[in-house]
Amino acid sequence: MNKEKTFYVTTPIYYPSDRLHIGHAYTTVAADSITRFKKMKGFDTMFLTGSDEHGQKIERKAKQAGQEPEEYVDQIVKTFKELWQALGIEYDYFIRTTEDRHQKVVQKIFKKLYDNGDIYKGHYEGWYCTPDEAFWTDRQVGKEKLCPDCGRPVEWVEEESYFFKMGKYAQRLLDHIDQHPEFIQPESRRNEMINFIKQGLDDLSVSRTTFDWGVPVPIDNDHVIYVWIDALSNYITAIGYLTDQDNFKHYWPADIHLVGKDILRFHSIIWPIILMALDLPLPKQVFGHGWLLSETGKMSKSRGNVVDPIQLIEDFGIDPIRYYLLREVLFGTDGTYSTEALIQRINSDLANDLGNLLNRTVSMVEQYFAKVVPEPDQLKEVDQDLINTGLKTAKEVESYLSNLKFTHALESLWNFVRRSNKYIDQTEPWILGRDKDNNKDKEKRLKTVLYNLLEALRMIAVMLKPFMVKAPSEIGKQIGDQSIVENADWEDLSWGKLSSKIKVQKSEPIFPRIDIREYFNKKQKKEQEKTMTNENNNNSKDNLIDFETFQKLDLRVAEIIEAERIEDSNKLIKLQVKVADDNRQLVAGIAKDYQAEELVGKKIVIVYNLKPAEIFGVKSNGMILAASNDETLTLITPENPISSGSKVK
């Protein structure tokens, strides 16, 4: 096997939760994109992802669901794989930490570390966050005893534990980072990790006795192996460590571990030290990218701000979502997801720039040459400039992708898309087409112009292959040769590959424009219909509900502290309301009956425990109560003065 032409990339193995969000998709799409690129460069690639399935949290959730842990995680892993399929993710291996092979190797790893004197038995006392599987000190949890990461209550844990000697390898790791500055990226995060190590590394608890759902410690049946050795070892167990050494040596060390910045410490400190203790090479790079945030902060189910990638794919398609994730946010920094920004990208970059270039070019070939791709003639300076730009773009995209600069790569590619559109304006093929039948020179010139545009589209399609799933093939089909794009490698990005005499196939626009107002109106209508359907389903035939159902409603008095009309809507007002010590935002369809300014200071009644929704692109956390006679609408307000937050009983 030729080791020099291998490329091994990993994402974190995701912890089974009820719902993966767009942030998880961000990491995995990036890994898929770089893998597709490396394949086009002729590398033997290995792309690993998977699920981390052990731990107390899973054990508790399974019990609450009335299931065995394995049954519980089986259902969730199915949703993982469905999402990756929906996003066109082409992973090579999906590892589950419940796999028999993985568990046996994890036990051997634990035993080897123990035999080397790197693991010893001790006693642990400290604060523990079950959802994050993290231990914290008194100072870190503060007086409120809350997890500094997720804000949820921690619990005091006292138990016997096996510990791993982290400090023993601290200086060796610092030396490695110093000698290999590319090891931790971006640079700002490398500096954070260096400072963390220099503060001193405590020995690490690597076993638990308070739950059973885990890999048994091979030397002590009362303990299970904790997440650090269990989950992190997946990167080597998946490729054959201690089971298929030839395959393991072929791919290891990994070229890139792609992880979110919140777990960079585990992957750039704990994991490398485990590898050092095992006398194994370290991965070439650990890249800690930023978070893809919602407009209300980090996405989490508890905050109600999770953006569902499956719904986005249903609304907009695979390629626009992949394009947006890689184009919108500089990889390595935090960014904010916005549906409005997504639609703007679709309309401006995909529909206007690329879609129009394809449609205009194919339409002119159809009109002027009966769909047949013309043979080019002599080149002029403007033609050579287009060609040079295309060749230069291929080199730039290659360089940027090699360094995980996805945004820069797509910026460069879109400069070429726009340059190709400008080429149409410069050469004015519609004027050449008017006189081509009576002027052979103009006919030759038109053939050259249209061939160059088709060839530019071929090169664009090939360069899009790392980023998109369907569009490159569709572009190839419309310019007359689907296979030339589908089978293209990166070395095929030279000018003049498209054959003449083949026929173009004009089709529907590959990226239709989206009316943003119409989209949000439809979303609002669907939400309303869904709410009404749920209400109808929950009600009996005579529309009666029992007292227990009524008690589930949390109706509160709220005071309106701000109000403003929502732009482009004739009936929606955005309200900021105060409910005791809680301030929240609501959207209400009352603009036809109330002016925004007259609402400030008014006491109203709201449904306090309504699931948050997005209405016309604006987050709404609750619902106001109002009465209507089909002509006018009146807010439900308290008759006498009463403090905000008071419950309606």
Image (cartoon, rainbow, N blue to C red):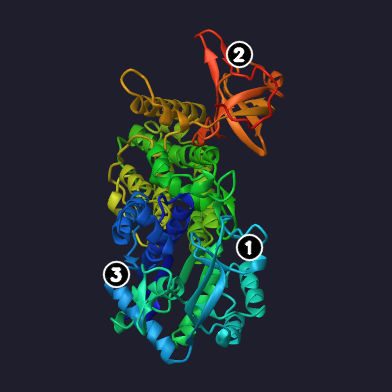
Q: Distance between the residues labelled 2 and 1?
A: 49 Å
Quick one: label 2, few (<14), some, or many (20+) residues within 10 Å?
few
Query: Is 626 located above or below residue 438 in the figure?
Result: above
Quick one: label 3, few (<14), some, or many (20+) residues within 10 Å?
few
The percent coordinates of residue 523 (x first, y second) are 45, 30
Query: Is 441 located above or below residue 577 in the figure?
Result: below
Q: Which amino acid type is shown beneath numbered disc 2?
A: Asp
Residue at which label 2 appears: 593
Dividing the image into 4 quarters, which one contains the C terminus? Answer: top right
The percent coordinates of residue 396 (x first, y second) are 52, 61
- Say which label, 3 or 2, has the lower sequence index: 3
Q: Residue 99 carries which label?
A: 3
Residue at point 38%, 72% (across, down): 234
Left or right: 447 with respect to 421?
A: left
Residue at which label 1 appears: 141
Q: Which amino acid type is shown beneath numbered disc 3?
A: Glu
Residue nearest the viewer, comparing 47 with 196: 196
**Image quarter of residue 405:** bottom right
The percent coordinates of residue 66 (x first, y second) are 32, 52
Query: Is 550 located above or below residue 201 in the figure?
Result: above
Q: Which amino acid type is shown beneath numbered disc 1?
A: Val
Q: How far apart are marks 1 and 3 (CA)?
A: 35 Å
Q: Can you tell which of label 1 and label 3 is closer to the viewer?
A: 1
Residue nearest the viewer, comparing 120 with 391: 120
